Image (cartoon, rainbow, N blue to C red):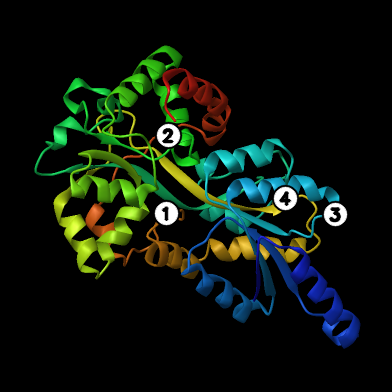
Amino acid sequence: MTRSPRNLAAPIAALALALSVAGPAAAQEKVLNLYSARHYQTDEALYQNFTKATGIRINRVDADDAGVLARLKSEGAASPADVILLVDAARLWRAEVDGLFQPVRSRILEERIPAQLRGKDSGQGSAWFGFSTRARMIVYDKARVPKTDVDQYEKLAAPVNKGRVCTRSGSHPYNLSLFGAMLEHLGPEKTETWLKGVVDNMARAPKGGDTDQIKAVASGECAVAVTNSYYLARMMRSQAPADREVVEKIGAVFPNQADHGTHVNVAGGAVARHARNRDAAVQFLEYLSSTEAQGYFADGNNEWPAVIGTQLVNPALKALGSFKTETVPISVIGMNQVKVQQILDRVGYK
């Protein structure tokens, strides 16, 4: 597998040179150009096993979600991308709306990936497919905060949590997706009131990533935080004494189990609009829905598999347990994000 971080020219130039020198035999080599926003070390096994099983070599280009989409737009019809992997539902929806994907009709994907974890079916197939999910959980200081104070997202704004809350930036895609879902549950006015209450309850200004929020709760910098589940599961599985000490100090809850359920985000993939290796691209997406690949998502990166019935061996996911998820459509969350950002600006949520 060839990897080029944030630089497409190198792998494409190298491939062109190899073909010109090696002649017809090399020209028959099967190649898949992958633009990926996934930066997880454990995914290497996914790619390597796909190549072993199919003989299709993967050229991978890494960037974050925004970088991948910006590259696709700038390259236009000249883009060599075959498959796109993104780690945020709203970004998948945005790319679909912008016409950066092409629909895929696949019996395998349609049987294995639930309808709510796929893009809209245009009649020619879905534009994208989700392959793993992660929950937006609330963690809290067990010594200072009763679980009942944080068992709903709405309670992040409750008076009892004054001075307790810490989060990463409100404009981060993970939070924008959560807030977009809450806008659907609460409506615009109540969502603005809620987010203003969250800002008023902050122990410090938003900063850092989700792991930083977990550590801030354990250190006493704050008492309540929001995190994606796989960051917590990663620390639960860590053998580092510092991580184990953090985990022992915190509790975790799946919010809103008594009503609409916990917000989940999805990581997924799509065939690029101008893919030159379309058959290989579809084959790769189908591989990501396989039992083997779904196991890597779960055990390797602490994400919940998208395929129903996948057996979990991950001890952290087992320990976190099952939970009720919300059912707000991805398209609605995506459409709500502009309104959410405007609300964040008004309430001063940086």
- Where 67 falls versus 56 (above or below)? above
Observer-nearest of 221 and 233: 221
Residue at numbered disc 2: 178
- Where 52 falls versus 8 (above or below)? below
Q: Earlier in the sequence, mark 3 or mark 1?
A: 3
Give the number of the mark in front: 2 or 4: 4
Q: Residues within 10 Å of mark 4 (few under 14, many from 20)?
A: some
- Where 22 falls versus 202 (above or below)? below
Seen in the image, is 301 located left or right of residue 114? left
- Where 132 falls versus 346 (above or below)? below
Q: Amino acid at mark 3?
A: Ala
Q: Position of residue 106 (x, y in %)?
A: 65, 55
Give the number of the mark in front: 3 or 4: 4
Q: Are marks 1 and 4 in contact (CB under 8 Å)?
A: no
Observer-nearest of 64 and 309: 64
Quarter of the picture holding the N terminus: bottom right
Measured Cα–Cα span from mark 2 to mark 4: 26 Å
